[in-house]
């Protein structure tokens, strides 16, 4: 026998039906539906938004009073050597009232009008603190040196 081990197919055998058994059902390759439905997505989005909003509000409340900034605008220095003597005194006066020196610079680019020669900003908690700082004896001495050595102005700006 030339084809040993081979058997003769049954009369009811149909090769086409054999192949059809291995063809997937219609829609088998379609993308499976997500386990998260539209309603669940909306609920997750609302939960995430509520959590983020609560964290933001808590952060704002934890900060307490809005910040206030003391801004010093030096238009011209009439005595630069005298002006430099007050820099060491300023930091002590600011720290006594728990203020934070934010910035001070002479590198200013004018966009409109005349730019000041020097600009300084100090942050305090609330508006009352910089007012008390400005009325303190140490700051009165510093303001006296500043007005003798420069043409400047100082003012308080309320922040958020």
Image (cartoon, rainbow, N blue to C red):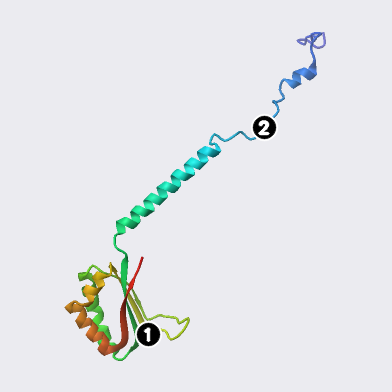
Q: In the rendered image, which quarter contains the C terminus?
A: bottom left
Q: In the rendered image, which quarter contains the N terminus?
A: top right
Q: Is residue 114 visible?
A: yes
Residue 7 pos. (x, y %): 78, 9
Q: What residue is drawn where x is 43% and y is 86%?
A: 114
Q: Give me the disc on residue 79.
A: none
Q: Label 2, label 1: how many angstroms apart (C-alpha)?
A: 72 Å
Q: State whether residue 6 is above or below residue 100.
A: above
N-term-proximal mark, 2 vs 1: 2
Residue 155 pos. (x, y %): 31, 78
In-front residue for pair 19/34: 34
Local packing at callout 1 (Cα closer than 10 Å; few below 14, some 14-19, many 20+) is: some
Residue of label 1: 117
Q: Please state if 153 lies on the left or on the right of 135 as rendered.
A: right
At mark 1, the secondary structure is loop
Local packing at callout 2 (Cα closer than 10 Å; few below 14, some 14-19, many 20+) is: few
Residue 45 pos. (x, y %): 48, 45
At mark 2, the secondary structure is loop
Q: Please state if 50 lies on the left or on the right of 3 as rendered.
A: left
In-front residue for pair 75/51: 51
Residue of label 2: 29
Residue 21 pos. (x, y %): 72, 20
In-front residue for pair 21/44: 44
Q: What residue is drawn where x is 32% and y is 64%?
A: 66
Residues at circles 2 and 1 in contact by the CB criterion of under 8 Å:
no
Q: Is residue 91 visible?
A: no
Q: In the image as oriented, which residue stretches furthest toward the left? A: 137
Q: What residue is drawn where x is 67% and y is 29%?
A: 28
In-front residue for pair 50/5: 50
């Amino acid at each position: 026998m030339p084809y040993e081990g081979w058997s003769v197919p049954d009369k009811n055998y149909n090769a086409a039906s054999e192949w059809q058994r291995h063809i997937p059902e219609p829609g088998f390759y379609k993308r499976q539906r997500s386990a998260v439905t539209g309603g669940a997505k909306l609920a997750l989005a609302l939960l995430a938004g509520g959590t983020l909003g609560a964290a933001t509000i808590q952060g704002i409340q934890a900060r307490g009073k809005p910040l206030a900034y003391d801004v010093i605008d030096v238009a011209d220095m009439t005595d630069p050597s005298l002006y430099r003597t007050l820099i060491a005194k300023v930091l002590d006066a600011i720290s006594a009232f728990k203020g934070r020196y934010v910035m001070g610079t002479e590198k200013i680019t004018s966009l409109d009008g005349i730019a000041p020669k020097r600009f300084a900003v100090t942050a305090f908690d609330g508006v009352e603190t910089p007012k008390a700082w400005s009325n303190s004896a140490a700051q009165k001495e510093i303001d006296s040196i500043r007005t003798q050595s420069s043409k400047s102005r100082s003012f308080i700006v309320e922040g958020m």
